[in-house]
Amino acid sequence: MKVIASSLRKGNVVDIDGRLYVVLTAQNFHPGKGTPVTQVDMRRISDGTKVSERWKTTEQVERANVDEREYDFLYEDAEGYHFMEPESYDQVVVSPDVVGDGKVFLTEGMRVYLQTHNDVAISIEFPQKVVVEITETEPVVKGQTASSSYKPAMCTNGLRVMVPPHISAGTRIVINTEDLSYVERAKD
């Protein structure tokens, strides 16, 4: 299906010369003079190579027919990461390069969105917020104001995040998966 370049968004899959690419970033530039253009950074699905492309915003780009569904994470082994479709119980094995750095967020039973093309997983979308537990952090320093100061903390999954001074080891917090920022204390 052909779409105009300016409508491309992160996570879209495009077909260029028979090869599939997943869009990492897409920005539209409208200079004062000249033609507006769309700058797109993509990753080639077959080998993981990153590519930058620039099109006129009105240019037609072939968007690949991709199936996007919810899947539950089951487990990880030598084959890769195993996910199950909750309605049909179909299982899919996702390679580590598709999961990428997001593997630290995966917990048993976590619901994610998987994009598949010809029954092969090509892209994964994690929930925007996840709950993690703090394993170690610096002690509170008296006199620090809570409004502006954050301190480093280590989570059970190995992530380092910045948290407010009142957070201590053993506390469960909610973090944003896009930028690893502290959102709030977990409500459980």
Image (cartoon, rainbow, N blue to C red):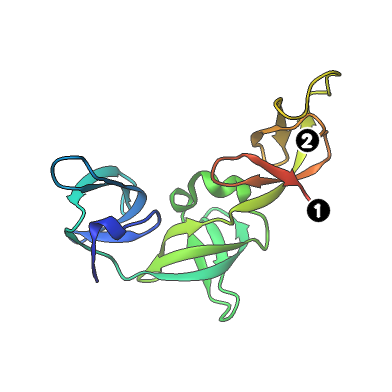
32 horizontally vs 72: left or right:
left
- Kindly identify the amino acid type of the residue bearing the numbered disc 2: Thr
Which residue is rendered at x = 62% and y = 39% of the image? Answer: 181
What residue is pinned by disc 1?
187
Label of residue 35 in the image: none
* Element under disc 2: strand
Quadrant the N terminus occupies = bottom left
Amino acid under disc 1: Lys
Q: Position of residue 110 (x, y in %)?
A: 64, 61
Please tell me whether residue 100 is drawn above or below residue 68 in the rendered image. above
Count up the numbered dots.
2
Q: Nearer the viewer, mark 1 or mark 2?
A: 1
Residue at x 80% of width, y 35% of height: 167
Residue 104 lies left or right of residue 12; in this view the side is right
Question: Where the C terminus falls, by quadrant?
Answer: bottom right
> To which quarter of the image does residue 149 belong?
top right
Query: Residue 138 placed where, x, y %?
Result: 78, 24
Q: Secondary structure at mark 1?
A: loop
**Residue 107: x percent and y percent?**
67, 55
- Residue 78 or residue 85, whichever sits in front: 85
Residue appearing at x 58%, y 77% in the figure: 89
What residue is shown with label 2?
A: 135
